[in-house]
Image: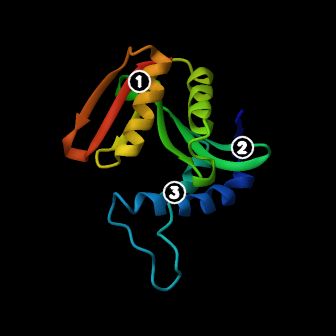
Amino acid sequence: MRIELVQVGADKKEILRNLMQFYIYDFSTYLDLEVDGATGSYPPYPDLDKWWDASSRHVPYLLKSGGCIAGFASVELLEGRRNADYYMTEFFVLRKYRRLGIGSDAAVQLFDKYQGTWLVSQISTNLPAQMFWRKIIKKYTAGNYEEDSHFENRQITQRFSS
């Protein structure tokens, strides 16, 4: 199933803000996140509006399948910071679209679109995400990638070149 990457302009940021609630819900399994008793929603994603500031290095995308929204991704342009060019800031596929190849197709499209050194991180307790990224990155790089564990911030990070 082919996925379409659609860059999210400021005029469509409300779509991303809404999708972030599902993303944060998924993360509540791994982080201590609670629904606000007064609103019934999770706290907003921090500094999301800044993704559209003139100085922002974030490039958000909707993942679309057959014209329907299937998830989102955000690439941060590191410009050499952290000894890399790009960081997969966020990546989310709605449950309905998981295990259909949509996530792997979107990831590969992004790696191909942004040629250079990549960083991709997962929370150390999020084993499904680690399995997903290791599988994709291993296949994409023919096993030519590095992986580090950062115990101080509870993350696993892969580094590779596209």
Q: CA distance from mark 2 to mark 1?
A: 28 Å
Farthest-out residue, left: 152
Q: Does residue 55 show up?
A: no
Q: Quadrant of the N terminus?
A: top right
- Residue of label 1: 84
Percent x, y of residue 51: 57, 48
Of the residues under marks 2 and 3, which one precedes in the sequence?
3
How crowded pointer 1 is (Cα within 10 Å; few <14, some 14-19, many 20+) is rated as: some
Asked if the residue under mark 3 is in contact with the one under mark 1, i.e. CB atoms within 8 Å, the reply is no
The residue wearing badge 2 is 64
Q: CA distance from mark 2 to mark 3?
A: 16 Å
Location of residue 161 with respect to 52 vertically, above or below: above
Could you say which disc has been placed on residue 104 in the image?
none
Q: Earlier in the sequence, mark 2 or mark 1?
A: 2
Judged from the image, the secondary structure of the residue bearing numbered disc 1 is: loop
Establish if 71 lies above or below 30. Answer: above
Residue found 45% across the figure and 36% down from its top:
132
- Residue type, mark 3 in image: Tyr
Crowdedness near tag 2: few (<14), some (14–19) or many (≥20) residues, C-alpha within 10 Å? some
- Does the CB distance between marks 2 and 3 fall below 8 Å? no
Q: Which residue is mark 3?
A: 23
**Dot 2 lies on which element?**
strand
Q: Residue furthest front?
A: 99
Question: Mark 1: which amino acid?
Answer: Ala
In this image, 82 relative to 142: left or right? left
Depth check: give the residue in front, 80 or 41. Answer: 41
Name the secondary structure under disc 3: helix
Q: Which residue corresponds to the image point at 71% horizontal and 50% vertical from the top-left?
A: 69
Binning the other alpha carbons within 10 Å of mark 3 as few (below 14), some (14 to 19) or many (20 upward) gives: many
Pointers 2 and 1 in contact (C-beta within 8 Å): no
User: In the picture, residue 124 is in which quadrant?
Assistant: top left
Cα–Cα span, label 1 and label 3? 25 Å
